[in-house]
Image (spheres, rainbow, N blue to C red):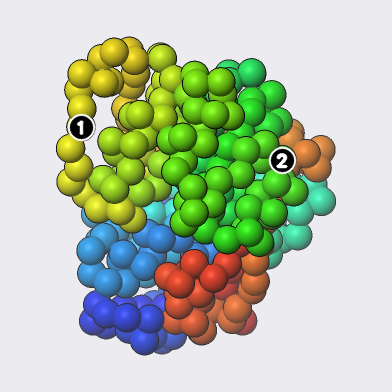
Amino acid sequence: MHAITIPEPGGPEALVWDEVPDPVPGEGEALVEVVAGAVNRADILQRQGFYDPPAGASPYPGLECSGRITALGQGVSGWSVGDEVCALLSGGGYAEKVAVPAGQLLPVPKGVDLRQAAALPEVVCTVWSNVFMVAHLRPGETLLVHGGSSGIGTMAIQLAKAVGARVAVTAGTREKLERCAALGADVLINYREQDFVAEIRQATDGAGADVILDNMGAKYLDRNVQALAVNGRLAIIGMQGGIKGELNIAALLNKRAAISATSLRARPLGEKAAIVAAVREHVWPLLDAGHVRPVVDRELPMSEAGAAHRVVEESGHIGKVLLVAP
């Protein structure tokens, strides 16, 4: 088979479409013939040499894919050869085939194109685990999503609205904010021109956001705490704004607020399977009914993964960028 390899860390040109050995499904795994994969920020960090795959995972980038099961390892039940699936991965999505633990497989939702289903597993699992399983967003509460036009952001908007929450988003252009509004966002904040702390306070009559989903890390840490409501919850899922920030613990105590920071890739298989099971129970019915949909900006051949990385690094997209296998 062919896969995107990274002979040496570097820029987008470091991604090489090369012939590699076929994966073999182990016990409890299924072999999936990949139809499409999706680009995530973690893939860019891996390409740059800053985010190695977990021990035992595929060395190739790609944290989600869609395709068809072609073989089953020992002990796998509930799935059959030929099933169309999408999958949460620890790596290997930028390839023609990938071995996937059965607990990380999901059926392709009704009405979703098989290719576009590749845009679902990582973002849905990230949003559901952080916003709902950890931060416990409830109907009537306000969610602030930084990077509302990203793959994570576009899914967070839809899921929060589906459960009856109010959604505020930050984005850097009018076009991106308009797309967020079309998905249901109630409060639109241009972070290049507006102070999101002031805007969220104004939009909530001074109360602040009950939950904040943050992809920036250090750069926004202090202002996120300022923007939280009493008993608010800050969920940090990214470090695009740096890794070290100063925390005003007194402000956090005064608001009786909580901060969580999680990643998905390195979690044990059992934890990932539990998240996938929760997603299948709570989110898949929304997808099947058409209430929630993947947002795909463009599709590129998998062999042109470098070009796809440039698009994502330049933030020139809305939703997800897909890589289509030959």
Amino acid type, callout 1 = Leu
Q: Position of residue 165 (x, y in %)?
A: 64, 25
Q: Position of residue 151 (x, y in %)?
A: 56, 54
Q: Position of residue 19 (x, y in %)?
A: 42, 86
Compared to 222, does 36 lie above or below?
Answer: below
- Name which residue lies at 34% across and 36% down: 223
Separation of marks 2 and 1 at Cα, in angstroms: 32 Å
- Horizontally, residue 156 falls left or right of residue 162, namely left
Examine the rendered structure and indicate whether residue 150 appears above or below residue 186. Answer: below
Q: Residue at x 25, y 53 (%)?
A: 242
| Disc 1 target residue | 247
Quick one: quadrant of the C terminus? bottom right
Q: Residues within 10 Å of mark 1 (few under 14, many from 20)?
A: few
Name the side, left or right, on which 300 lies relative to 268.
Answer: right
Residue 230, numbered circle: none
Q: Is residue 274 above or below residue 17?
A: above
The residue beneath circle 2 is 184
Q: Give the mark, 2 or 1, whose residue is nearer the N terminus.
A: 2
SS of the residue at dot 1?
loop
What is the three-letter code of the residue carrying label 2?
Gly
* Location of residue 250 (image quadrant): top left
Image x and y of residue 311, in percent: 50, 74
Q: Nearer the viewer, residue 324 or 233?
A: 233
Instruction: Answer whether residue 283 is visible to the viewer in this image.
Output: no
User: Residue at the location (33% across, 21% down)?
Assistant: 258
In the rendered view, does 87 fall on the left or right side of 108? left
Asked which secondary structure carries label 2, the reply is: loop
Let me know if residue 111 appears in the view: yes
Give whichever of 237, 196 is nearer the camera. 196
Relative height, residue 95 to residue 100 (above, below): below
Q: Is residue 147 left or right of residue 78?
A: left
